Amino acid sequence: MKLLSIAIPCYNSQDYMERCIKSLLPGGDDVEIIIVNDGSHDMTPEIADAYQKKYPGIVKAVHQENGGHGEAVNAGIANASGLFFKVVDSDDWVDEEAYRRIMDTLREIAGSEQTLDMLISNFVYEKEGARRKKVMKYTSALVQDKMFTWSDVRHMRKGQYLLMHSVIYRTKLLRDCGLKLPSHTFYVDNLYVYIPLVHVKTMYYLNVDFYRYYIGREDQSVNEEIMIRRIDQQIKVNKMMIDAYDLWKIPNKKQRKYMFNYLEIITVISTVLLIRSGTEENLEKKRELWRYIREADLRLFHRLRNGIMGNTMNLPGRGGRRISIAAYKIAQKVVGFN
């Protein structure tokens, strides 16, 4: 069994996937790099096969019909033989020194009698043209360099949430929780973190800037204009998160609070994008989303709606929408959205 399986979902990634692959090769024989070619029409499949041939036993090329990012992640999990599992998108890369420390930590834990559900590390917004790179750290909220549980978690700020880039899951946990991401759907990385998180009991935080999250391609899914055009998919993911769990039944208070906060930030993003589009059709979709939450869980609706962020996103009239957009622009600068 490998120590760590890393899936690289690839769709027409020929121009940048090699930087990603090369950054992962220093993991050596303890790592399994699964390149998932999701029905690409460029040289992606040939590049994947070439790396598999050059690094047998380390690189595995998986080819499938196009199913979107979610199906590529599903394929990675299905083909993983590692004790732990990580997703690295094909236009991103990892820091070698941080990578070494993560591998050393995973080896130590794997050789002990402890069971680790999730390892957390920092990620860096590699934003094109930005003078200063934003680093998402968790030092104020999480215990460092030892195993801990939700009861040990300190206050996590609203913008200090876990993304796919932050986490390495135990592979068996992903399979046992029945994670199955929807096909042909963008923004499923939120489901990838959110769905297994309820099942996480033990965590370990390394304060290293491991994952490098590139932001800057015009066709990138987190480009704001593209997010508005794909708003129906954002809403679909948002609703799947709402339907996934009855959060009130989570026994640990801190875990329950974090899950509420995660759902809140995704709902705020959906809401403000609908406002920013400026169309009456999308303003009606905003109202429909909040009606959906109200009908699904009235207590959840009041918790989300009556919070500071919920109130800001639902101020009435054109003036209220301007305030909502101004608040979002501040969040953009803090968090680093494109």
Image (tube, rainbow, N blue to C red):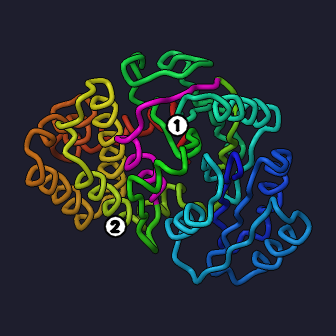
Is 190 included in the stretch rendered in magenta? yes
Q: Residue 132, can we see it?
A: no
Coordinates of residue 264 in the picture (x, y in percent): 30, 39
In the shown orientation, is residue 264 left or right of residue 144? left
Coordinates of residue 180 in the picture (x, y in percent): 42, 64
C-alpha gap between disc 2 and disc 1: 31 Å
What kind of residue is marked 2?
A: Asp
Is 269 included in the stretch rendered in magenta? no
> Is label 2 or label 1 in front?
1
User: Which sits in the foreground, 317 or 301?
Assistant: 301
Find the magenta span and give its range. Answer: 187-206
In the shown orientation, is residue 309 left or right of residue 203? left
For mark 2, what is the residue?
Answer: 232
Coordinates of residue 12 in the picture (x, y in percent): 69, 74
For mark 1, what is the residue?
Answer: 118
Q: Does residue 10 sit above or below 311 in this rendering?
A: below
Residue for point 61% across, 46% down? 84
Q: Give the crowd class for mark 1: few <14, some 14-19, many >=20 residues within 10 Å.
A: many
Q: Does residue 203 sit above or below 321 in this rendering?
A: above
Residue for point 58% across, 19% down? 146
Tell me which corner region of the image, top left, top right, bottom left or bottom right, holds residue 152: top left
Q: Mark 2 or 1 closer to N-term?
A: 1
Coordinates of residue 29 in the picture (x, y in percent): 83, 50
Label 1's element? strand
What kind of residue is marked 1?
A: Met
Q: Give the crowd class for mark 2: few <14, some 14-19, many >=20 residues within 10 Å.
A: some
